[in-house]
Amino acid sequence: MDTSKSNLFYACEMVLEEEGIYGDVSCDEWAFSLLPLDVDLLSMELPEFFRDYFLEGDQRWINTVAQALHLLSTLYGPFLNCYGIGRCAKMSYDLWRKLEEEEDSETKGRRPEIGHIFLLDRDMDFVTALCSQVVYEGLVDDTFRIKCGSVDFGPEVTSSDKSLKVLLNAEDKVFNEIRNEHFSNVFGFLSQKARNLQAQYDRRRGMDIKQMKNFVSQELKGLKQEHRLLSLHIGACESIMKKKTKQDFQELIKTEHALLEGFNIRESTNYIEEHIDRQVSPIESLRLMCLLSITENGLIPKDYRSLKTQYLQSYGPEHLLTFSNLRRAGLLTEQAPGDTLTAVENKMSKLVTDKAAGKITDAFSSLAKRSNFRAISKKLNLIPRVDGEYDLKVPRDMAYVFSGAYVPLSCRIIEQVLERRSWQGLDEVIRLLNCSEFAFTDMTKEDKASSESLRLILVVFLGGCTFSEISALRFLGRERGYRFIFLTTAITNSARLMEAMSEVKA
Amino acid sequence: MNRTKGDEEEYWNSSKFKAFTFDDEDDELSQLKESKRAVNSLRDFVDDDDDDDLERVSWTGEPVGSISWSIKETAGNSGSTPEGREQLKGRNSFYTQLPKPTSTYSLSSFFKGRTRPGSFQSLSDALSDTPSKSYAPELGRPKGEYRDYSNDWSPSDTVRRLRRGKVCSLERFRSLQDKLQLLEEAVSMHDGNVITAVLIFLKRTLSKEILFRELEVRQVALRHLIHFLKETGDQKLLLDLFRFLDRTEELALTHYREHLNIQDPEKRKEFLKTCIGLPFSAEDSAHIQDHYTLLERQIIIEANDRHLESAGQTEIFRKHPRKASILNMPLVTTLFYACFYHYTESEGTFSSPINLKKTFKIPDKQYVLTALAARAKLRAWNDVDALFTTKNWLGYTKKRAPIGFHRVVEILHKNSAPVQILQDYVNLVEDVDTKLNLATKLKCHDVVIDTCRDLKDRQQLLAYRSKVDKGSVEEEKIDAILNSSQIRWKN
């Protein structure tokens, strides 16, 4: 039995002791570390991870992550190649290695089944997490909020007066086919399926008794099941369409793309201002401001002041606290005077190469969290150049998850590092990202590894990952012959991120 | 106890042990030595894991290691007797218990005639020989992983134990240096839970000045302390800490945050007043001032309107009863409310929209947008008109809008404005494409027709013809235009 009580925080025990009930209660730890949400998705169900670490700097969950890695390496053998980017990734990795040493791991002698493991901090790519999602699963999450792999579909979706809780994973055959698709394909796909289904049903017209009996016993159940799922997803699509039209989704996406690509910034800022003035949604307004801030390396002071004032006027003065949180986390910042891109970059390079000092103090680290999104975007070709229409039906790169406008940064980094099997050639990018990176290859196990295991990659998102990223990497896997397994501290999206930072419960 | 008396006799008289009887006249010292030997060997026996026969039972009869036993153990007062304190000097443990001399395992049976626990004091020499081991079998000691406790854990060992959730007393880290070393170890391990555990200990055993001083240069530990204080609601210490660190803005924000816990509007208002002088940045100070002023106004308006509503004399309140209180609503919502219920009031009243606009310096754009939404909801089209009508220097009226007429049309449409009104405003939309789109969407036929004509776009006009009703006025109009020879069509 695992004797680790790591999740029973000492702070909790202290409170029990102070209140004089320490001995009267028996404390146990429910050692629940990993929840399999799907065949390739493991979640630690720790949504609080994001705020605790990225806002408060509390490292309380790092041990939990290390334990999860330990569990996986115990089950699947040692990982051959370990890559990571970000402070939290580094700390989790270090702690995990200490754990392995201490426990004198039972992994020795085991064949490695997982060839690569990649650890990422959420804050090395906020942009992706803040974008509106347009792949089906992401859209369902944005619209209905998927919890622990299941979703509550209300009456408007189920076409009855009841709500239904539906499990969304690979078991749902219909869902599995559409989950990674761009939304524009989904309706067409579902209609086709509906027609096929109807044709199947119609077959029974020409049947004799024997055939009918066969049909009823073998096929009818499956068809009924498919019919049920189909109508649910069609209902969901309709509901999504309705909501998005009402929200003027088209305009919203246009603004997001402009921000990602870096043109029409003034227009986008005006759009955001109007969004706030109209009191459309506190979370959405915040999200857009953060997207503007990160892509532009902070808002210009005039805009920061004016948008902040208008936000407080539209959504409540207590959000002063929310703005303070966002600033601390690096999500919504103000450009310091004289903060041209080159000036910032010079400061950065001095700090990052100053590793001899070993410590980057907090004052600097908040500075260090400045994003250099435009430069990174150019270096990594995150904005695809398209001649003509971008074909969403047969996507040619990961940008399809954002309608061809943008390749998720996190996914691109993973792609590049896997290609090179190291961080070689990515120095400039790392410098711009302002994170520490690491790579470690266990040479001793190299020969034991099968080619099968070398294609299996475990990606660990510290702070949450979105369905869009999962879809993009699944696509990459199909293209390059990899198989990705995802481990995340929690599933996230832009709304959850903003809610975590909001001091005031909406 | 599951042994019979006979067994016990055998046990004590077995060859493993030197026989002790109470009748021996031996020299005290040699007896002590014998005791020491016996106890040592007994200890091995007792320590032996594999021996399942030996069931360890505590003084109260509970098997050692059971829940009820551990409750009693931890509830007990270790160190309350002088002898207990002596023992504790050499040991660190939450679980130290002075064995009471009432069981058959009584140690006094090893010493001739010595039944008093005072015999332990004479063992102090023996104790000092091997400081980490006790000579008395520690029967109160828990089984399992805790058996291996000693008081000699180094800081890195301690931290490692803490990470695994093992029992670990930090009491022995008494010197500041030891404490800081422990903290350093915890920080280098990266586990936030351990860092917090150490900080809890430091907070308890260090004066706050020293604690603050040391943490000032240790950023990681400092962050954990701040978070810990926030979570446990130790507002006072948190404020002291920020004051010490001269983090004035965080000091102000932490103080301000408290207002969320105050429900009563009057009390909250009073509290906000105390926030005004705090060391916020210049902009934030203005926001705090506005917050206070806003709540102050809302309290007045709320009281007044509640009175009006219950009196039942005011038409607007009768027709549109209030759905919620205006307290703690954002400014824009308050403005909407004022435009809805108090539109005609002069600048002098607290509830007049103009007053709100002036007091809070609400920009024109925002004001017009909000007023429009309110008046449109009430279907007060004249008021809507008045919002956009200005007289230019020649005395002609002209319609202007700081928000773009397409927005105006949208809001009017949302509130089901009659087509005539919509049409007028669609006509005012500046951008031609937007105008056409809107007009088409909203079926403002005249506008579409006129715009197509102005654009000289025959194709579009033809296409639109099929959309209008057969034999309608619009169709006739289209036909007239199409047949007109004066227009140079583009297509």
Image (cartoon, rainbow, N blue to C red):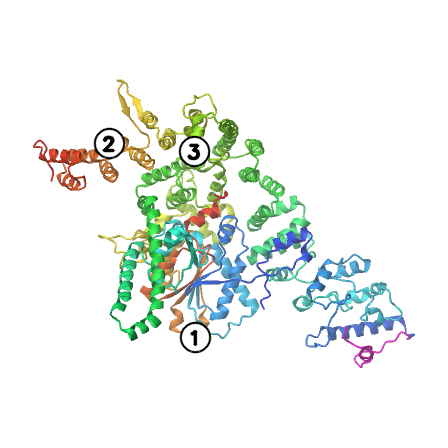
Q: Quadrant of the C terminus of chain B?
A: top left
CA neighbours of label 1 inside 10 A, class few (<14), some (14 to 19), many (20+): some
Residue B427 seen from this side: yes
What residue span does the magenta drawing correspond to?
B1-23
Nearer the observer: mark 1 or 3; the answer is 3
User: Which residue does the numbered mark 3 point to in the structure image?
Assistant: B332
Q: Check disc 3 and report its element: helix, strand or loop.
A: helix
- Give, as a three-letter code, the residue at label 1: Lys
CA neighbours of label 3 inside 10 A, class few (<14), some (14 to 19), many (20+): many
- Give, as a three-letter code, the residue at label 3: Val
Rendered position, A506 above or below B316: below
Q: Check disc 1 and report its element: helix, strand or loop.
A: helix
- Give, as a three-letter code, the residue at label 2: Asn
- Alpha carbon separation for disc pair 2 and 1: 76 Å
Residue A142 seen from this side: no
Report the number of discs: 3
Q: Quadrant of the N terminus of chain B?
A: bottom right
Chain containing mark 3:
B
Q: Are marks 2 and 1 on the same chain?
A: no
Chain containing mark 1:
A
Nearer the observer: mark 2 or 3; the answer is 2
User: Which residue does the numbered mark 1 point to in the structure image?
Assistant: A448
- Alpha carbon separation for disc pair 1 and 3: 67 Å
